[in-house]
Image (tube, rainbow, N blue to C red):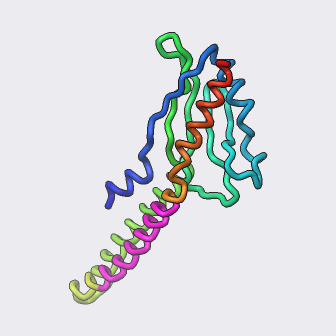
């Protein structure tokens, strides 16, 4: 289960997009077709974000927000004499931090429940069993968080390709 949680939270997909011209041209062309975050209210199906030479953050805007939707984070670099937008698709860092705290809290609560049951009971085994029953409930609640994470990510499965298409089209327009 820990491997599954780690993969769902910290997994990422690398992405690299070639751009013709200079870094400034790539930034200008991508920024021209990408509205800033916050200006896309009620505009579904638009890629919004922030485009700077050293930092590009893009996500797909939707009518209903999904914090588990992947976002592209990268930067413009020069590789082998060519300008490339290099980055990765992953969960938002704040969402990863929140879910890490969520699973950590539930893991610690389960351990404390078993230890408290054993320590507070006059006989050790009935206390351990009571603590295990409590821990089972806590682990079930943590598993509910994992199911919510997987379900929410399944709703936005096509977002990386949508964002990648937006980036390719914007960088190709700069070449034309």
Q: Give residue 26's quadrant in the image.
A: top right
Q: Is residue 129 left or right of residue 12?
A: left
Q: Nearer the viewer, residue 165 or 76?
A: 165
Residue in the foreground of this view, choosing between 161 and 73: 161
Q: Is residue 105 visible?
A: no
In the image shown, does 174 or 133 lie closer to the viewer?
174
Q: Is residue 58 above or below residue 102?
A: above
How many numbered discs?
A: 0
Residue at the spot 38% in from the left edge and 66% down from the top edge: 107
- Relative to 136, does residue 164 appear above or below in the rendering? above
Q: Quadrant of the N terminus?
A: bottom left
At 51% from the left and 32% from the top, the residue drawn is 87
Q: Please report the residue visible at 68 percent of the width from the left and 36 percent of the height from the top.
A: 50
The image quadrant that residue 59 belongs to is: top right
Check if residue 61 falls in the magenta segment. no
Q: Quadrant of the C terminus?
A: top right
Q: Position of residue 27 (x, y in %)?
A: 67, 24
User: Which percent across, then down, holds residue 154?
Assistant: 49, 58
Does residue 76 appear left or right of residue 39 in this picture?
A: left
Q: Position of residue 82 (x, y in %)?
A: 53, 14
- Taking the image as drawn, is residue 103 in sight? yes
Extreme top residue here? Answer: 81
User: Is 139 placed above or below 100 here?
Assistant: below
State the predominant SS element of the stretch in magenta: helix
* First to last magenta residue range: 130-152
Residue 24 appears at what percent x and percent y? 68, 18
Q: Residue furthest front?
A: 176
48 with respect to 163 (left or right): right
* Residue in view at x 44 percent, y 52 percent: 9
């Amino acid at each position: 289960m820990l491997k599954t949680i780690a993969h769902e939270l910290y997994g990422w997909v690398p992405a690299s997009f070639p751009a013709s011209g200079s870094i400034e041209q790539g930034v200008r062309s991508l920024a021209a077709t990408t509205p800033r975050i916050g200006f896309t209210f009620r505009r579904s199906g638009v890629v919004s974000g922030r485009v700077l030479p050293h930092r590009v953050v893009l996500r797909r805007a939707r009518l209903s927000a999904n914090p588990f939707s992947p976002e592209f984070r990268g930067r413009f670099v020069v590789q082998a004499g060519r300008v490339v937008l290099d980055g990765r698709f992953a969960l938002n860092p704040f969402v990863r931090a929140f879910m890490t705290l969520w699973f950590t809290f539930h893991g610690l609560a389960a351990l404390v429940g078993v230890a408290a049951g054993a320590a507070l009971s006059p006989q050790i085994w009935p206390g351990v069993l009571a603590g295990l029953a409590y821990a089972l409930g806590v682990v079930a609640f943590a598993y509910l968080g994992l199911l919510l994470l997987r379900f929410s990510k399944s709703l936005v499965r096509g977002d990386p390709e949508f964002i990648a298409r937006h980036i390719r089209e914007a960088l190709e327009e700069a070449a034309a």
